[in-house]
Image (cartoon, rainbow, N blue to C red):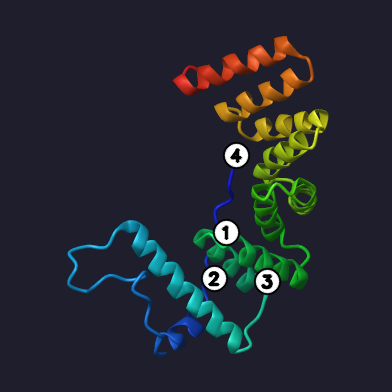
């Protein structure tokens, strides 16, 4: 399955330089280690960075700076923190402000997919595709949602499209083989299984 990396972490240098002079509230003991520690794990460093970025965005919002990218980025941060409820809420606000934010639709679709809310996932991936047909990852994820809702024919169409973008991805061929099996196309499924194995071995 494909996951969209953030298109950007909002760069509002003027505001961030201004905000750096603010005194942030201390991080909790879970978020930061003692300064005397020899090192901080990469995971903890990442967590601290996300907390700081979230604080910056929240201050911008309190200052009245509000646009689709701010909510998109806050949604991504919450998603990285594992708070899908808040992530979904922020992606929703992002598309309320700008109904052409394809990435926000896509990322919200990913959350719906995780929650097994396949119908809403399909709607969001479809919105992303209609806004930007080159969001190739939306096709395989929508294909997964179609397959889970008993629509293998539509899933196959989306996987065909995804493979047109990623011709050397073994996972796509493997997943398409499962769909072909469900459609009773055993010979075609076997060919995709073989292709998946070749690509995994680097023979494709």
Outermost residue, front side? 29
Helix, strand or loop for disc 3: helix
How far across and how far down the image is residue 146, in percent?
A: 77, 37
Residue occupied by mark 3: 68
Tell me the number on the disc at residue 10.
Answer: 2
How dense is the environment of label 3, judged by Cα within 10 Å: few (below 14), some, or many (20 and up)?
A: many
Residue nearest the observer in this picture, 94 or 132:
94
Q: Earlier in the sequence, mark 1 or mark 4?
A: 4
Residue nearest the observer in this picture, 23 or 33:
33
Residue occupied by mark 4: 1
Q: CA distance from mark 3 to mark 1?
A: 13 Å
At 65% from the left and 12% from the top, the residue drawn is 190
Cβ atoms under marks 3 and 4 closer than 8 Å:
no
How dense is the environment of label 2, judged by Cα within 10 Å: few (below 14), some, or many (20 and up)?
A: some
Q: Earlier in the sequence, mark 3 or mark 4?
A: 4
Helix, strand or loop for disc 1: loop
How far across and how far down the image is residue 23, in percent?
A: 39, 89
Q: CA distance from mark 1 to mark 4?
A: 18 Å
């Amino acid at each position: 399955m494909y996951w969209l990396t953030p298109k950007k972490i909002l760069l509002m240098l003027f505001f961030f330089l201004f905000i750096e002079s603010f005194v942030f509230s201390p991080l909790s003991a879970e978020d930061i280690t003692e300064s005397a520690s020899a090192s901080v794990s990469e995971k903890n460093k990442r967590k601290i960075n996300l907390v700081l970025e979230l604080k910056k965005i929240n201050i911008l919002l309190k200052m009245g700076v509000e646009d689709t990218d701010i909510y998109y980025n806050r949604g991504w941060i919450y998603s990285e923190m594992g708070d899908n409820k808040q992530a979904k809420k922020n992606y929703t606000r992002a598309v309320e402000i700008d109904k052409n934010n394809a990435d926000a639709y896509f990322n919200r679709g990913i959350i719906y997919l995780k929650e097994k809310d396949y119908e809403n996932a399909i709607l969001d991936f479809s919105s992303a595709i209609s806004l930007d047909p080159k969001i190739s990852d939306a096709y395989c994820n929508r294909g997964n949602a179609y397959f889970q809702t008993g629509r293998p024919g539509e899933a196959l169409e989306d996987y065909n499209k995804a493979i047109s973008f990623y011709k050397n991805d073994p996972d796509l061929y493997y997943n398409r083989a499962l769909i072909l099996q469900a459609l009773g196309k055993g010979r075609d499924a076997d060919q995709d299984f073989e292709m998946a194995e070749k690509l995994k071995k680097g023979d494709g």
